[in-house]
Image (cartoon, rainbow, N blue to C red):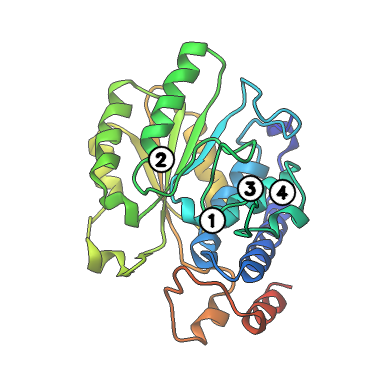
Amino acid sequence: MAAQANALSLEELKEKGKVLRRLIIRMTTEAGSGHPSSSLSAVEVVNALWFGGFMKYDPENPNWEARDRFILSKGHAVPVLYAAMAEAGYFSEEDVMTLRKLGSPFEGHPNMKRLPGIEASTGSLGQGLSLGIGQALGARLNDNGSNVFVVIGDGEMGEGQVWEALAAAEKYKLGNLTAIIDQNGYQQTGATHDVLDLGSFEEKISAFGWYTQTIEGNDQAAVVEALENVAKVTDRPKAIISKTKKGYGILPVLEETGDVNYHGKPLSPELAEKALAFLA
């Protein structure tokens, strides 16, 4: 069982983040499709959860009842989850290189029916937090000490279901639920403030009764500190607004293309080679 006792140091986490980024680039370029930039923005959060000692899990027993649950509501960013799970020992790096290939369980969005360790099938944006509430309530009923972490995209925060879920989670005082908003500033059709400007997430979510904090989400130390803070709060649901940048880690390479959003397309083999060299 992987647990807090096996937490990597901050410097080790930073190196692990590079490993995850390289794998994200390699698998999406090999697939010839996917969402590398959306995956790269969430690396520090996913990295800390899986390797910073904040989640209990057992790759040898993915259905272990007392495990913590991780739900990637922004399911199109699943390469970051596959990369973390491969590094955690659920499957090999060679396996994830079949991303989006015909017959592969490594689909373009998480599918819990095809891959042990995936806690929720996501991709229809706005549903992940509701699924997390159900799992958090189930953990409370089973009294198994399980915590639930849900990563949400800032674009999907425009879905009304998210705000209904925020109200419900506070009603049930789900202290075992943490929502993390990957606020990278972009969605499919453009900048989030142009598509639907929702203002301050922290002000709105705290008004629902949640414990909230806003951080620089591509700062690994800030992410670790934020997760340490939420672990101390047990009487209400917790939210971390993680301000990130799409494509973080290889931004100078992507900026050369003139597309700062770079949504829903892989790096070409030539661009991937340049990005991998940049991460070396």
Distance (Cα) linking label 3 and label 4: 13 Å
Please name the residue shown 53% across and 46% down the image.
Answer: 110
Distance (Cα) linking label 3 and label 1: 9 Å
Please name the residue shown 53% across and 79% down the image.
Answer: 254
Q: Quadrant of residue 196?
A: bottom left
Distance (Cα) linking label 1 and label 4: 16 Å
Q: Is residue 220 visible?
A: no
- For label 3, count other residues whose C-alpha is less than 10 Å away and answer few (under 14), some (14-19) or many (20+): many
The label nearer to you, 2 versus 3, is 3
Q: Which residue is mark 2?
A: 128
The amino acid type found where label 2 is placed reads Gly
The amino acid type found where label 3 is placed reads Pro
- For label 2, count other residues whose C-alpha is less than 10 Å away and answer few (under 14), some (14-19) or many (20+): many
Which quadrant does the N terminus fall into? top right
Distance (Cα) linking label 2 and label 3: 20 Å
In the image, residue 64 lies at what x, y percent?
A: 66, 23
Which quadrant does the C terminus fall into? bottom right
Residue 86 circle label = 4
- For label 1, count other residues whose C-alpha is less than 10 Å away and answer few (under 14), some (14-19) or many (20+): many
Mark 3 or mark 4, earlier in chain: 4
Q: Which residue is mark 1?
A: 108
